Image (cartoon, helix red, strand yellow):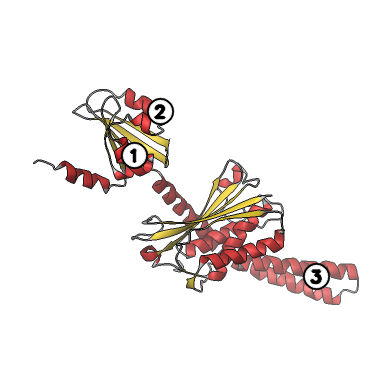
Amino acid sequence: MVIDPEHLSGVLDRLDTGVVRTERNGRIGFINSAAETYLLISKDRAHGQPLFDVTEIPRELQEAVSSLPEGRQSIRLHELKLAAGLFDCTIQSTEDGNVLLELHNLEWEKMRSRLQQRELQTGMLELLSKNLGHEVRNPLGGIRGAAQMLAEELEDDELSTLARLIMRESDRIDELIQRFGQPELDLGELDLYPLLDEALDLLAVEFRDSVSVERDYDPSIPFIQGDATALRRVLVNLLRNACQASASRISIKTRIEYGTTLLQSGKGSVIRLDVMDNGAGVPESLRSLLFLPFVTGRRDGTGLGLALSQQIASAHGGLLTYETQEQGSRFTLYLPFGDGAKRQGEVH
């Protein structure tokens, strides 16, 4: 059977895997659409040109292509830094003496790993909520009641003040426990930008002129189905964390990522909101634990803000992630819309 080259090219262009075929001398004979995106080069510019001249290629990949044995041999390289991110690469020599490169985008696996971590984090909150509600709140009520009786009976002002301190701290612990529960969302159609404005207004009152804010907004961001109060809490928490990390500059960036099927099955797309700062960042020892309850790098922190924010994102079918930067931090909130957002607001 004879395969039509144009038909084969069309099929390869539909793959998420990047495919590049080069001659032994490194000149590009074919490149599919995914590889164009991953290497940030066009087919017209790439055709007939040496691969290592038209785009930046890691030395490890160059050496592997140069040393590839004749015959049907293959080499697998892991976590290569290319123009569009991290990739695994399979290098094969073909029967006609050419070299075939397959580029596998690791962002997919990275996102799946983050989603698995999200399930673990939100599951821990639910477990803590159930256990703490039963094991702590009942005796806590008894402690508060006893302190209240002492405060009413004691004539000594100093001892009475101490009893009222016990009452206040008991109420504070009770409030923290109540905040553990899975959020019950009041869903409605909302515009994300007014929520951002409200969060920034609160930030301005709280921290005044100590921080400057840069906005890079995508005007095409659509309305979404969500709980305005809950999402506002997430935005306020991210902005407040940046200020408390001694940031002098915060950058907020919004974009749409079309065709994203990572958050939920189906077509769908996501709104991506980045909050970046130039603050002190998160200590390396805390980064992998950041969204777990009671994990905090501040002496006066409760360790609940990010855990609850992750829970709210999850209840919307979304995800909250963290990445360190050369200076400061980047928190990213993903919120689905379109077909991929059909199950928003479901509580499990």
Which residue matches tag 3?
164
Quadrant containing the N terminus is: top left
Placement of 30 over or under 296, stated as above or below: above
- Could you classify mark 3 by the number of other residues whose Cα lies within 10 Å: few (under 14), some (14-19), or many (20 or more)? some
Residue 37, x across and y down, in percent: 36, 44
Mark 1 or mark 2, which has the lower sequence index? 2
Residue 245, x across and y down, in percent: 67, 50
Left/right placement of residue 86 relative to residue 50 reads: right
Residue positioned 47% across, 65% down in the render: 316
SS for callout 3: helix
Q: Disc 1 vs disc 2: Cβ atoms closer than 8 Å?
A: no
Mark 3 or mark 2, which has the lower sequence index? 2
Left/right placement of residue 108 relative to residue 253 reads: left
Residue positioned 38% across, 57% down in the render: 258
Which residue matches tag 1?
103
SS for callout 1: strand
Mark 1 or mark 3, which has the lower sequence index? 1
- Could you classify mark 2 by the number of other residues whose Cα lies within 10 Å: few (under 14), some (14-19), or many (20 or more)? few
Q: Nearer the viewer, residue 221 or 128?
A: 221
Which residue matches tag 2?
60
* Residue lying farthest to the left in this orientation: 1
SS for callout 2: helix
Type of the residue with mark 1: Leu
Q: CA distance from mark 1 to mark 2?
A: 14 Å
Q: Nearer the viewer, mark 1 or mark 3?
A: 1
